[in-house]
Image (cartoon, rainbow, N blue to C red):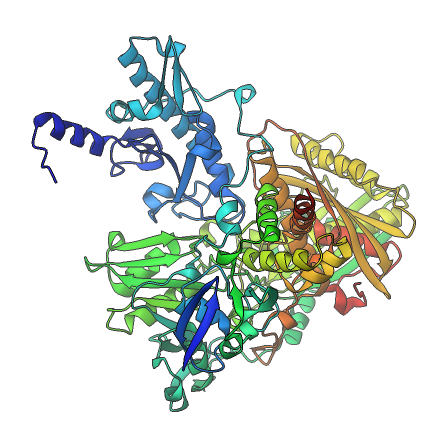
């Protein structure tokens, strides 16, 4: 080896080391740039060799932000999708907060694209202007003569890769207001041929999920949890577990919520767990059954509501309905539902050399476990690091206000001498029985119709188990006692419903509850859209025309809802079902997006219903990655339909009755024969797509079944006399 | 006990108790993590591997029963059908979270190896045991048809 001590060599090395351009924003939101990420939250990094990396602040559970945020940077910077990489941002809410969440860094509410759209475009545009300015200075050219295309700066008779100007650009101040491309200039945004960035690794087995982590010398921990919510571990007998090869030991968690079982590998941990008997103290544990909870919910919707949601006069609404020509009334019940993401919950904690710890996790809201771990380990925030890995689905489950599984891992790690990393693994049984369900909910709706079939009044009672009360999200979502997540999609629906009253009653929980793909809209859309169908039928009017009449004369909100309704009806050949088939339609706004779906079925409730085709129309503003939008609609439809067909979580004296997929049967490939998605062209700001496909799917199916079968008001449908082919 | 496994063309000596599911030997001992744990009861198909070319659920296959067989995991796929399936999967952007997709692909390759021109009904029948919570089924079906066309070309 030759030691290069020349000054020229030293300078070259120093320049190369410094030649990394970061562009992002300061905590106050202003654009910032530099050669180190310390003083800003970088959204894009450009290495000396010109490698462009999007730094993605949202986790990837399949909904597409790795592709989406990379697209925004690539578009504005002027590189191809093949030439941009991505990495997940570190956990630091002061730098990577979700603009829709306040001080939390996280993913949810279908906000990833909506809150990142301008941030990431501006970062890409600023990087473009800085690189062009550096090239213009070097070439003595005017910046207006230069462009970047496919990573090449060209113009004024020159052409060079961006790599040549990274060093110079890294010394510049970021422009305050870089020029964003006009939509007419977009080459990648809105381009249906842009491919997912994560397809190749997820197709050849190389994508790494938290479950795939194998740190040197790691232990696997599994937890024996109380079969009843609130039960406490008083002790255990592990004599038989000592016969299991690879078993290390067990310990009661400091919060007594369970017993941690440590082993050399996953299978040994599972085997040892089976061999350990835990002594439970159930004195403070839940003993109710889901039937009792159901009765409480149904009683609540038949009593005076605890909260007036929309400030309407309940007595006046009652009078409008009582004086109507016809009254349509239905009571609904929605069971608890598990999320059951494909990758069971897991995360790993290891000690860092500086006394800190690192959490490896498919972290949906990293700020939650970040705070929790700082508390448990009594460490400052900067000594807690979170490595965000691919998440094998979530549907909300990886984001609990209590950071439930990360806290388990932290407690299990804290009970060791901390010399070995601890990987917490949940089995599918842990997942299905582990709480944090979509709450059980009841609705009761009375609708009055006049002689012409117009709505005179709409009395809507909801009884639910509040998701947000008692969590860090309460100040944002609970107002005057009303947990908006229990009633979203009712009073705030774009429909112009005369005399609408919405009341809410909170009912005590018998288990932990959580947001589940589309949160309150999972049940409110079902109720709104099946009641619309019932009302239209009672009025003798076409369900599409009946809905459109409630949107006429409205503003943009109403026009966009009407737009997708008409598009779905047209593309789904509404009213022209082939012989032997029935159609149902539903439309709903959620997370800023408008989605209508026509479900076409064959068969019947008695002999078996087959979903033949779902035709979907979506208006999510500007569709950044149209094929990702389509995929999210396809997936959201499947998620909605699969659960209403046959899924429920029930409790017997506080113990969950279901264990695994055989009794929480997932949607299968043959359950839906075809899905067709149409995107409304739009220049509006992008809105969510991860969740909005779900809400209309279940009521559209219910409406199709009701054409010649039962009106299903108690879910799942298999409990209401509907069989499926 | 010492067990000799032939996996992806290589022989591995592993130390595993009889009755250990092949899945955990592949994942925890051999550190090949493309094969996934989803349910542990052969109900989701995420753990699907090939034993002598036939798809099996590795969570329900005892390691000692795999001795002597040619085991193929997603990392070792290289047949014509496999290449077509993986190319079609990328072409149609089938994946979302991706966690089940190794298993889906192992099953799809098993299907097309034995039946290069399956009908839609045959696809749905064969793939029924592979669950996808993201519900990418529509694209799985289309990608199998596309792979079938690619194999013919």
- Could you tell me which residue is drawn at 60 percent across and 33 percent down? A192
Residue at horizontal 49%, vertical 41%? A197
Q: Look at the picture and state if A716 lies above or below A571.
A: below
Task: Answer above or below: position of B126 versus A625.
Answer: below
> Residue A632: which quarter of the image?
top right
Above or below A47: residue A137: above
**Quadrant that contains the C terminus of chain A:** bottom right
Residue at far right of view: A579
Query: Which of the pair A446/A82 is nearer the observer?
Result: A82
Numbered-mark total? 0
Compared across the picture, whether B113 is left or right of A378 comes to right
Instruction: Residue B49: give x, y in percent of width and height.
Output: 55, 64
Is residue A446 among what the camera can see? no
Residue A52, given in percent of the width and then of the height, sits at 37, 33
Residue B31 seen: yes
| A638 vs A347: above or below | above
* The N terminus of chain A sits in image quarter: top left
Front one among A208 and A648: A208
Left or right: where does residue A204 sit relative to residue A77?
A: right
Coordinates of residue B79 in the picture (x, y in percent): 57, 54
Residue A307 in the image: state x and y as whole percent: 60, 56
């Amino acid at each position: 080896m030759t030691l290069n001590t020349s000054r020229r060599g030293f300078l070259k090395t120093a320049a190369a080391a410094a030649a990394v351009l970061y562009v992002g924003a300061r905590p106050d939101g202003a654009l910032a740039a530099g050669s180190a990420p310390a003083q800003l939250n970088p959204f894009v990094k450009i290495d000396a060799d010109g490698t462009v990396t999007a730094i993605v602040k949202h986790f990837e559970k399949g909904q597409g932000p790795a592709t989406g945020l990379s697209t925004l940077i690539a578009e504005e910077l002027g590189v191809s999708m093949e030439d941009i990489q991505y990495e997940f941002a570190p956990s630091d809410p002061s730098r990577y907060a979700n603009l829709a969440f306040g001080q939390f860094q996280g993913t949810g509410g279908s906000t990833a694209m909506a809150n990142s759209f301008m941030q990431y475009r501006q970062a890409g545009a600023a990087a473009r202007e800085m690189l062009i300015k550096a090239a213009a200075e070097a070439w003595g050219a005017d910046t207006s003569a230069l462009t970047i295309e496919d990573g090449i700066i060209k113009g004024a008779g020159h052409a060079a890769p961006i790599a040549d100007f990274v060093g110079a650009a890294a010394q510049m101040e970021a422009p305050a207001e870089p020029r964003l491309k006009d939509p007419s200039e977009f080459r990648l945004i809105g381009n249906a041929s842009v491919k997912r960035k994560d397809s190749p690794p997820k197709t050849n087995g190389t994508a790494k999920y938290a479950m795939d982590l194998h740190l040197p010398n790691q232990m696997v921990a599994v937890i024996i949890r109380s079969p009843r919510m609130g039960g406490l571990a008083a002790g255990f007998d592990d004599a038989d577990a000592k016969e299991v090869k690879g078993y290390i030991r067990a310990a009661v968690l400091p919060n007594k919520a369970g017993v941690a079982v440590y082993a050399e590998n996953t299978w040994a941990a599972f085997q040892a767990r089976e061999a350990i008997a835990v002594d439970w103290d159930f004195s403070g544990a839940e003993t109710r059954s889901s039937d009792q909870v159901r009765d409480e919910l149904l009683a609540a919707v038949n009593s005076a509501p605890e909260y007036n949601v929309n400030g309407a006069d309940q007595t006046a609404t009652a009078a409008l309905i009582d004086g109507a020509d016809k009254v349509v009334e239905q009571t609904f019940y929605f069971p608890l539902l598990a999320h059951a993401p494909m990758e069971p919950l897991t995360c790993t904690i290891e000690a860092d050399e500086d006394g800190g710890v690192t959490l490896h996790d498919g972290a949906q809201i990293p700020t939650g476990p970040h705070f929790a771990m700082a508390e448990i380990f009594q460490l400052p925030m900067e000594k807690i690091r979170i490595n965000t890995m691919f998440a094998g689905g979530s549907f909300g489950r990886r984001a609990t206000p209590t950071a439930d599984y990360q806290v388990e891992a932290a407690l299990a790690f804290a009970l060791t001498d901390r010399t070995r990393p601890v990987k917490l693994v949940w089995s599918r049984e842990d997942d299905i029985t582990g709480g944090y369900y979509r709450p059980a909910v009841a609705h009761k709706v009375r609708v009055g119709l006049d002689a012409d079939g117009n709505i005179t009044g709409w009395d809507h009672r909801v009884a639910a188990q509040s998701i947000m009360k008692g969590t860090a999200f309460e100040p944002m979502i609970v107002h005057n006692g009303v947990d908006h997540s229990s009633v979203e999609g009712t009073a705030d629906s774009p429909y112009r419903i005369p005399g609408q009253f919405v009341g809410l009653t909170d009912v005590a929980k018998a288990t932990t509850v959580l947001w589940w793909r589309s949160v309150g809209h999972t049940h409110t859309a079902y109720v709104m859209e099946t009641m619309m169908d019932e009302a239209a039928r009672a009025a003798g009017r076409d369900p599409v025309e009946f809905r459109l009449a409630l949107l006429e004369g409205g503003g943009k909100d109403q026009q966009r809802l009407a737009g997708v309704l008409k598009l779905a009806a047209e593309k789904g050949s509404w009213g022209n079902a082939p012989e032997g088939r029935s159609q149902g339609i539903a439309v709903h706004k959620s997370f800023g997006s408008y989605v209508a779906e026509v479900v076409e079925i064959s068969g019947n409730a008695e002999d078996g219903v087959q979903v033949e085709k779902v035709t979907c129309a979506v208006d999510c503003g500007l569709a950044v990655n149209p094929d990702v939008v389509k995929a999210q609609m396809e997936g959201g439809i499947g998620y909605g339909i699969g659960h209403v067909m046959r899924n429920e979580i029930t409790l017997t004296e506080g113990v969950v009755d279901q264990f695994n997929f055989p009794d929480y049967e997932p949607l299968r490939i043959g359950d839906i024969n075809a899905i067709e998605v149409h995107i409304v062209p739009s220049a509006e700001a992008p809105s969510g797509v991860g969740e909005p496909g779900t809400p209309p799917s279940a009521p559209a199916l219910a409406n199709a079944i009701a054409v010649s079968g039962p009106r299903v008001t108690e879910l799942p449908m298999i409990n209401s006399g509907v069989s499926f082919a | 006990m010492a067990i000799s496994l032939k996996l992806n063309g290589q022989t591995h000596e592993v130390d595993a108790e009889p009755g250990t599911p092949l899945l955990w030997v592949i994942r925890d001992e051999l550190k090949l993590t493309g094969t996934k744990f989803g349910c542990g009861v052969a109900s989701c198909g995420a753990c699907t591997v090939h034993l002598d070319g036939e798809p099996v659920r590795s969570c329900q296959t005892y390691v000692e029963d795999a001795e002597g067989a040619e085991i193929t995991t997603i990392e070792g796929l290289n047949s014509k059908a496999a290449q077509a399936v993986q190319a079609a999967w990328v072409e149609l952007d089938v994946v979302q979270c991706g966690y089940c997709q190794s298993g889906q692909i192992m099953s799809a390759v098993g299907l097309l190896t034995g039946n290069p021109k399956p009908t839609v009904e045959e696809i749905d029948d064969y793939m029924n045991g592979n669950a996808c919570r993201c519900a990418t089924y529509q694209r799985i079906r289309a990608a199998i048809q596309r792979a079938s066309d690619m194999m013919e070309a």
